[in-house]
Image: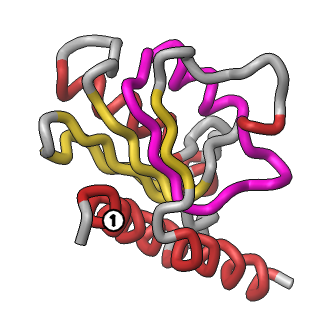
Amino acid sequence: MDRHEFFMKKALEEARLAGEKGEIPVGAVVVCNERVIARARNQTELLHDVTAHAEMLAITAAATATGGKFLDNCTLYVTLEPCVMCGGALAWARLGELVYGAPDPQRGYARVTPPVLHPKTKVVAGILTEECAALVDRFFERKR
């Protein structure tokens, strides 16, 4: 298994936990020096906070773990393409690399101009796409 798949599976674990709690199943992990330093999942319902996306919570946890606000030596693995809000936060954090699973054709950061992410952030898309998308699809099928 390659590195990206290994860490995306960790993000998928978080996404499944979110789904079990009635949250949109999105999970994230932040990796620095090949070690997970932060884990998070959507908690907007639990916290009654529209900003409590997995990415936002992961940024905060990673900043605490590193003792600094910049994550330029870190990789964020997230199961769904970040929204514009999260993309902006990732830019401010100067994230080194973003790896995501499923695209978000409705709210994903890549749909806006000008680009939201920091220009030095490397992006890798489509890691375990089917597995990541299936979690979200099943969640919304049950809601209907």
Q: At x 51% / y 13%, what residue is drawn?
A: 92
State which quarter of the image contains the N terminus. Answer: bottom left
Number of numbered callouts drawn:
1
Side of 102 where 60 appears, left or right? left
Q: Quadrant of residue 52?
A: top right
Figure check: 26 above or below 55: below
Residue assigned mark 1: 5
Q: Quadrant of residue 105?
A: bottom right
> Residue 100 at what x, y percent from top left?
51, 52
> Residue 18 at what x, y percent from top left?
49, 66
Look at the image and say whether residue 10 sits in the magenta stretch: no
Colour pattern: secondary structure
State which quarter of the image contains the C terminus. Answer: bottom right
10 Å crowding of disc 1: few (<14), some (14-19), many (20+): some
> Residue 114 at what x, y percent from top left?
80, 17
Q: At x 52% / y 78%, what residue is drawn?
A: 131
Q: At x 68% / y 29%, what residue is drawn?
A: 85
Camera-nearest residue between 49 and 104: 104
Side of 97 where 38 appears, left or right? left
> Residue 47 at what x, y percent from top left?
55, 47
Look at the image and say whether residue 98 sits in the magenta stretch: yes
Figure check: 70 above or below 1: above
Q: Secondary structure at mark 1?
A: helix
Side of 96 where 142 appears, left or right? right
| Residue segment shown in magenta | 84-109
Camera-nearest residue between 17 and 13: 13
